[in-house]
Image (tube, helix red, strand yellow):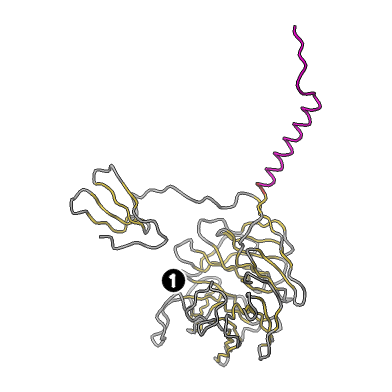
């Protein structure tokens, strides 16, 4: 028999196998571990140990020192704006799983989410009451006949709803956003809303947001900000004497602090090019916020520290679905020639032939199309 030498030695083949296995394991590891970007609305727990944030429409929790984040919600709806109860036992959040945003509450460790509101306008949670018995939230509902503002999601009044569910109670018809209560439950700080888009940057005008304090016992409102640009997301310090907030006094939006009784704001961060957003604090006044799609924590007087976060598993992505448009038709109109029909399904307009040979989608927008003719 003809004896031919092999092109590779046994040692070479073994080396190649090891390389292939190592590469495959590395690819699996890379695919299993996702380094997320554009995490939003981070909420730091009262004890400062845990951060809950919104990512790709679900809520995740991660140690404040960083690490692997685990999902708290896995739902087709969009979950956002998580808020911790002051005892660290519950999390309130907004979800559009029933259409528009409603307020939900769930155990901080995870579990079943309970729906607290069911109005036809968006409800956004801001805080819990001081005794954790109810959730404070903003809503653009119609309030009282004497209110000069036409009901609109742009101007949110402040309501509360019991954590066990029940009737929502109007607390103030003054337009409030980002309402945060003090430790005694006697005052609330908030940002107002005039007319400007919430994501606009670097504008100085009469419609920029201002910070206010509402003294609940005397029902008086005190303006806290003097800067003519944006003053946003106020958070009362745990001593009830100061307020942390975001402003654009020196370019990019950064964190400032000032006494509630007055005084000059002190700048705490010096980020450039991109705004700081989504400010929260723990009981020891450790601050947590987002910047350029990532999450940071910072103790007052110290430098900000980026929280290194990974997510394991197959996060929700590629959510396109093929669905039937034979049901759920909200309106329809027959063509003059009697051979075609135009109709609306899920807010889009379709045209179909009567003989069933052709169906064509003729709109594709994020808006609700209606009154087809």
Give the side of residue 329 with respect to residue 99, left or right.
Answer: left
Per the image, label 1 sits on a secondary structure element best described as loop
Q: Would you name the residue on which mark 1 appears? A: 121
Residue 14 pos. (x, y %):
78, 29
**In the figure, residue 230 lies in which quadrant?**
bottom right
Where's the C terminus, which quadrant? bottom left
Frontmost residue, 160 versus 309:
309
The residue segment tinted magenta is: 1-30
**In the figure, residue 184 lies in which quadrant?**
bottom right
Q: Residue furthest right?
A: 11
Q: Is residue 15 visible?
A: yes
Give the side of residue 75 with respect to residue 66, left or right.
Answer: left
Residue 186 pos. (x, y %):
61, 86
Residue drawn where x is 79% and y is 28% of the image: 12
Q: Residue furthest left?
A: 337
Q: Is residue 240 visible?
A: no
Frontmost residue, 134 versus 283:
283
Where's the N terminus, which quadrant? top right
**In the figure, residue 106 lies in which quadrant?**
bottom right
Whether 7 is among the magenta residues is yes
Frontmost residue, 268 versus 124:
268
Residue drawn where x is 72% and y is 39% of the image: 23
């Amino acid at each position: 028999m003809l004896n031919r030498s092999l092109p590779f030695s046994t040692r070479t083949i073994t080396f190649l196998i090891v390389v292939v296995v190592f590469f495959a394991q590395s690819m699996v590891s890379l695919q299993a571990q996702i380094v997320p970007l554009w995490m939003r609305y981070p909420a730091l727990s009262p004890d400062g140990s845990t951060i809950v944030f919104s990512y790709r429409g679900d809520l995740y929790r991660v140690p404040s020192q960083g690490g692997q984040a685990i999902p708290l919600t896995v739902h087709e709806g969009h979950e956002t704006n998580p808020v911790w109860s002051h005892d660290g036992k519950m999390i309130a959040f907004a979800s559009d799983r029933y259409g528009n945003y409603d307020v939900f509450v769930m155990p901080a460790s995870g579990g079943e989410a309970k729906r607290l509101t069911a109005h036809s306008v968006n409800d956004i949670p801001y805080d819990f009451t001081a005794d954790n018995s109810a959730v404070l939230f903003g809503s653009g509902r119609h309030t009282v006949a004497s209110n000069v503002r036409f009901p609109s999601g742009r101007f949110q009044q402040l309501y509360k709803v019991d954590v066990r569910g029940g009737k929502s109670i109007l607390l103030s018809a003054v337009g409030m956003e980002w309402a945060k209560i003090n430790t005694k439950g006697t005052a609330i700080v908030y940002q107002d809303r005039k007319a400007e888009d919430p994501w606009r940057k670097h504008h100085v005008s009469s419609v920029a947001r201002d910070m206010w304090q509402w003294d609940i016992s005397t029902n008086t409102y005190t303006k806290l900000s003097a800067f003519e640009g944006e003053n946003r997301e106020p958070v009362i310090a745990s001593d009830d004497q100061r307020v942390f907030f975001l402003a654009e006094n020196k370019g990019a939006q950064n964190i400032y602090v000032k006494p509630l009784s007055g005084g000059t704001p002190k700048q705490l961060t010096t980020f450039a090019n991109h705004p700081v957003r989504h400010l929260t604090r723990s009981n020891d006044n450790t601050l947590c916020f987002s910047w350029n799609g990532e999450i940071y924590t910072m103790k007052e007087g110290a430098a900000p520290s980026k929280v290194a976060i990974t997510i394991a598993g197959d996060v929700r992505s590629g959510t396109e679905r093929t669905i039937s448009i034979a049901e759920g038709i909200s309106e329809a109109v027959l063509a003059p020639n009697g051979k075609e029909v135009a109709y609306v399904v899920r807010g889009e307009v379709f045209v179909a032939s009567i003989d069933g040979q052709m169906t064509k989608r003729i709109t594709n927008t994020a808006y609700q199309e209606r009154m087809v003719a």
